[in-house]
Amino acid sequence: MASITVSHLVKQFAEKRAVNDINFSLGEHEFLVLVGPSGCGKTTTLRMLAGLEPSSEGDIQFGARRVNDIRPKERNVAMVFQDYAVFPHLTVYENIAYGLRARGAPSAMIAERVPKAAKIFRIDHLLTRKPRQLSGGERQRVALSRAMVRDADLYLYDEPLANLDAQLRYQAREDIMALHREKQRPSVYVTHDQSEAMAMGDRIAVMRAGRIEQIGSGADLYERPDNLFVAYFIGTPSINLFDVEIRNGEVGGLFAYSSAVSLRVAQEHEAALQPYLGKQVKLGLRPEDLHVPRLATFPVSAENQVQGVVNVVEPSSAGCAVYLSTLDESGKDYVATLRTRMPASYLGKEVPLAANMARAHYFDPASELAIRAQVTD
Ligand SMILES: Nc1ncnc2c1ncn2[C@@H]1O[C@H](COP(=O)(O)OP(=O)(O)OP(=O)(O)O)[C@@H](O)[C@H]1O
Ligand SMILES: [Mg+2]
């Protein structure tokens, strides 16, 4: 059963339409991540869910109840704000206890829960301090503890880890997920970091300019992006995009052709690309789908190799990221993430990489929509 349903939600600030007709529903235990570039309407969406910002149009339902006109306090929502607002005049302990006290929680409950929440976020040694005596990261963890200490019907997080260093960020992520599993309540988590979204979300909604471009599991968004924006936004490094023309091969089949590449279209993509014969499309190849030919797990031939010159090799824990440019005049930059090390002697050399064309993506350059075979189910 969906516990939260948002339909045709709009927020109009004077001339600015910050949220433009968004729709989603949240399962009872679901952790939804909203991700998108700065200014796309993430905070505004959360503030409408919390009741801090009136909506201009549309409905927000908690269960069967429409809550648009219900005051924030009566919605029983816990929210961690982007600017980790904490009360400067209260100690860390009182900051964490604030929401519980405001709702008249018994003192025994407060005495039990506050130290527990502080311990989870590793600020239990700071309970008597005031916020001005804390670092930004510690203040952020106070704000997290304050939200998580409560039993709310909906948890909202607005970029709560932005001020933490990489290690703490990773720990805090785990802590939030552990508490989420314990509480089993719907949660909406905002970030502009797609890797955080992929790591945390049961589902991810990718927003752009007030709209949800696509909503689905991390694997859905990565494997089957609906459009260029989602394809480019999800995955790091970003997907490589080549402008190509769809042509007939000399001995059958279709080719994605440009001055930089000539790649045979995988059989499973031929039907969808047939209408584009003689036309331009955008070919997307994820960095992970370019391989050292002798290590490829699929047959390699002249029809699925991209030739380029190596500009930069960046070692990573799993292998390396290789930045190349194509050999033609366009010198188009692209990147491959390899599961092997590439010696520095390859710098400046020409290297063929094998493209796993079964995993290629194609987009209509005008509509920017994915070109896909119609799925009938
Ligand atoms: N009170 C307001 N009055 C007018 N415009 C606003 C107001 N609040 C937000 N906006 C505008 O609405 C748009 C969405 O803002 P919002 O804060 O929701 O973005 P965001 O996705 O959270 O961005 P960020 O990642 O930078 O936090 C922005 O263009 C912003 O300038
Ligand atoms: Mg914001």
Image: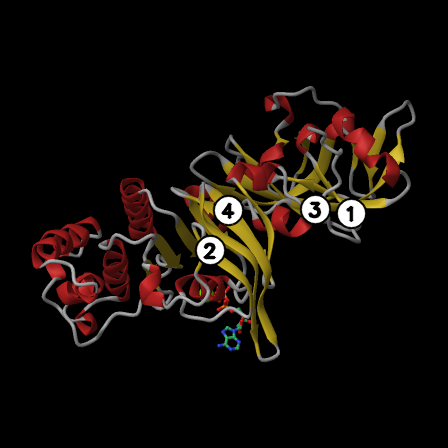
Give residue 111's position: percent from left, percent from top: 8, 56
Camera-side residue: 164 or 300?
164
Give me the residue at 50% from left, 33% from top.
341
SS for callout 3: strand
The amino acid on which the numbered mark 1 sits, given as a three-letter code, is: Asp
The amino acid on which the numbered mark 2 sits, given as a three-letter code, is: Gln
The reply to whether callout 4 and callout 1 are in contact (CB within 8 Å) is no
Give residue 48's position: percent from left, percent from top: 46, 65
- Read off the residue under disc 2: 61
Q: Earlier in the sequence, mark 3 or mark 4?
A: 4
Give the CA distance from mark 2 to mark 3: 40 Å
- Read off the residue under disc 1: 364
Give the CA distance from mark 3 to mark 4: 23 Å
Q: Is residue 324 visible?
A: no
Relative vertical location of residue 219 with respect to residue 242 in this rendering, above or below: above
Nearer mark to the viewer, of 2 and 1: 2
Q: Residue furthest bottom?
A: 14
Q: Within 10 Å of the Cα at label 4, are there few (<14), some (14-19), or many (20+) other Cα atoms?
A: many
Give me the residue at 82% from left, 36% from top.
273
Give me the residue at 62% from left, 78% from top.
15
Q: Earlier in the sequence, mark 2 or mark 1?
A: 2
Give the CA distance from mark 1 to mark 3: 12 Å
The reply to whether callout 2 and callout 1 are in contact (CB within 8 Å) is no
